[in-house]
Amino acid sequence: MIVSKTYEIDSCDDVELGIKRESKLEFKLCFDDEKEIKALVFIIPGLGGDVDENYREHLAEFVAGEFNVAVASVNYHCIGNRPQTGSTFYLDDIDKLILKVSCEAADIKLPYDVDNIQDYKQMSEIFHFVNNQIIEGKQKGNFTPNYFLNLHVSLQPAKNEYQNFGIMQAQDLLNVALYLKKNAP
């Protein structure tokens, strides 16, 4: 019978950057308890297009049912680094500086100081305001018809994590393999 279990385990801190990990490492394990397991297969989400959780579960169940393998699907460090996987848009200090200086250069007077922008709603309101000012400026001849203002926003990954070029992600996969070797179901 196909068994699917979810685990939350301790993983490792980021020794390179000296950052203590705040979140548990979550993974799902799927296997057929009536078969001899001969290998561990990893589904690594985010390599290629993003797929939803249902597809990953179906794929894991299919592979575990067809072959003598256990399938681990790991929600590795910073998996939530894209909007479709949980990140949120925000303005960091550099983004705010770009917004402020760009608007000053275009002679657009913002309704409040950019340092007061604290959430997505305020960011969206300011961007709509800037867009409307540019539209009005084009109508008055203050801007050329093809003028646009390049601005920048940042993404805040889910679970207060950060990108570190795959080091923590690779360690998470290894930690799942080591955990399962020691704690096989």
Image (cartoon, rainbow, N blue to C red):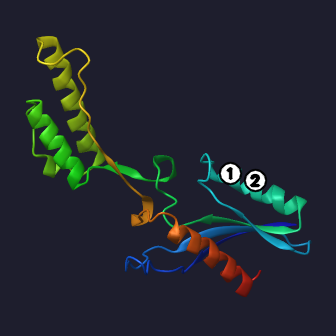
Depth check, front residue: 139 or 98: 98
Q: What is the quadrant of residue 63 in the picture? A: bottom right
Disc 1 residue type? Answer: Asn
Q: Identify which residue is drawn at 39% across, 65% down.
A: 160
The residue where tag 2 is placed is 58
Q: What is the quadrant of residue 21 in the picture? A: bottom left
Within 10 Å of the Cα at label 2, are there few (<14), some (14-19), or many (20+) other Cα atoms?
Answer: few
- Looking at the image, is 72 positioned above or below residue 81? below
Q: Secondary structure at mark 1?
A: helix
Q: Name the side, left or right, on which 118 lies relative to 107.
A: right
The disc at residue 122 is none
Q: Are marks 2 and 1 in contact (CB under 8 Å)?
A: yes
The residue where tag 1 is placed is 54
In whole angstroms, how far apart are the C-alphas of marks 2 and 1?
Answer: 6 Å
Disc 2 residue type? Answer: His
Whether residue 110 is visible, yes or no, is no
Q: Which residue in the rendered view is the most extreme toward the bottom?
A: 182
Whether residue 171 is visible, yes or no, is yes
Depth check, front residue: 48 or 70: 48
Q: Identify which residue is drawn at 82% across, 55% down.
A: 62
Within 10 Å of the Cα at label 1, are there few (<14), some (14-19), or many (20+) other Cα atoms?
Answer: few
Q: Name the side, left or right, on which 123 lies relative to 31.
A: left
Q: Position of residue 110 (x, y in %)?
A: 11, 36
